Image (cartoon, grey):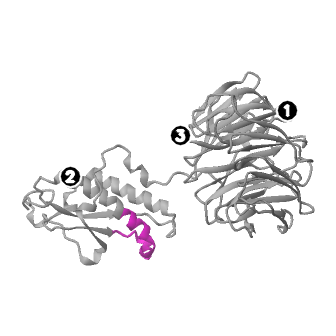
Amino acid sequence: MGSKQALKFTIFLVILLDLHTSTAAPSSDYRASAAQSYRHFCCHSLGLSPLVSLLGFPSLSLSFVYCQHLSIAAALPNCRAAVTTAIQLSATAVAEFHLVYRERPMSISGSHEEEDDHGEVFLDEADIIHEVPVDEEDLPDAVDEEGSDDEYFDEADDSVHTFTGHTGEVYTVVCSPVDATLVATGGGDDKGFMWKIGRGDFAQELSGHKDSVSSLAFSADGQLLASGSFDGIIQIWDTSSGNLKCTLEGPGGGIEWVRWHPRGHLVLAGSEDSTAWMWNADRGIYLNIFSGHGASVTCGDFTPDGKIICTGSDDATMRIWNPRSGENIHVVRGHPYHTEGLTSLALTSDSTLALTGSKDGSVHIVNIATGKVVNSLVSHSDSIECIGLAPSSPWAATGGMDQKLIIWDLQQSTPRSTCQHEDGVTCLTWIGTSRYLATGCVDGRVRIWDSLSGECVKTFSGHSDAIQSLAVCANLEYLVSVALDNTARIFEIAEYH
């Protein structure tokens, strides 16, 4: 067959799929099999020229012949995923070989030139199960980079369980402090859920919110769960029955965060309307409003002794309050404090110091009694997203959008380790009183770090989008993560506590 001005191909890609174990194999198995056939085709097609036919027509068609395994003669209807993937993969192959043979005459001959009778290969119409017309302009460019077919493989999932009850992005997760199996999650589908590790048949929907569930918190005794939403409402749930106990109203904007008093059923929440509110959850009544900030109250908490409230705002200030009277004791602002809005806050166990992080990439340490900045931790180059204090040592960990986790020695105010990530660090949590901590990242991975060495000792894959929140169950056996991929995933961490 001579060369033609416009070279086109009909590629007959033979896909050998061994489905003898199950006709309902996961789609990733189909993709792997199709990819394997694709690579085999790319490697050997130069020697298998009978697979390629020269056409002189302005369009290209890809025909795929499915060679059935004897044990799966009836499985053909279940192989659509494999065929679809093969179509996509062979389109890339066509582009590659189109470049190779664009100006080269092509002979469709057998292994011996003299065997002209076998020079061209024909297939019965009955052997073709799907024909897809493809315009040359729609073909992908030839791929030259080594390992470029990696995109066709799904990444391994290291989780032991995936909760898929949400239909939207998941923003927050908390674990019960007393029940090692009880988990609560909330997200952009305006719902929260209480569910249990190891109990796939148990899920209690927390319905009633009219906007995203932005924050969740269990009371210290584990009896109650608070769910805060961008609808400005907080709902209090009885964890034993799953029933709604009461609804707390007041703020004129969305709820940014919710916290419980360390020794009682008092709820504190920050709002987008520049205020913080406190309620008695047992009686369902409002106790105090804390006004003074000039922008959304983005972070806050009771001190561990329960005697003081600290709040941080997008107005670049921190305010220290008397919870009983609502009096604003101190306002921390101006040099040498933050120049942009606060994003995170952590309080030391002795209730003396507050660490705050900001969009400006700085971390400052404030004496709660005096309201004075006593030190600054400057090493990040982008927004601080999370702060965590080590329970058993004078160390702190900070994570930022500069792709760094930094572990600090608070006594020296110097960094012990800088732990590099592949993308921004969105959340972190220490694993009990151990030397290990976990980080969630925009790249969808959860990493375990040794705070002594600064080394990453484990990377968990499974999520396909940015991690939003992490929580460790009460017995320290499992870590739960939630992400923008609409899922919550459970990872085993028993060896790290």
Which label lies toward us, 1 or 3? 1
Q: How would you rate the neighbour count of disc 3 (Cα within 10 Å): few for under 14, some for 14-19, many for 20 or more? A: few
User: What span is in magenta?
Assistant: 66-86
Q: Secondary structure at mark 3?
A: loop
Residue at 38% across, 55% down:
36
Q: Depth check: 227 or 112 in front?
A: 227
The image shows residue 494, relative to residue 235, as above or below, that is above
Q: Nearer the viewer, mark 2 or mark 3?
A: 3
Identify the residue under disc 1.
352
Image spot of residue 42 (x, y percent): 29, 52
The numbered dot on residue 109 is none
**Which residue position holds label 3?**
422
Determine which quarter of the picture holds residue 206.
bottom right
- Characterize the magenta stretch by its predominant secondary structure: helix
Disc 1 packing (10 Å; few <14; some 14–19; many ≥20): some
Query: Quadrant where the N terminus lies?
Result: bottom left
**Of pointers 1 and 3, the one earlier in the residue sequence:** 1
Q: Are marks 2 and 1 in contact (CB under 8 Å)?
A: no
**Label 2 belongs to which residue?**
99
> Dot 2: what SS?
helix
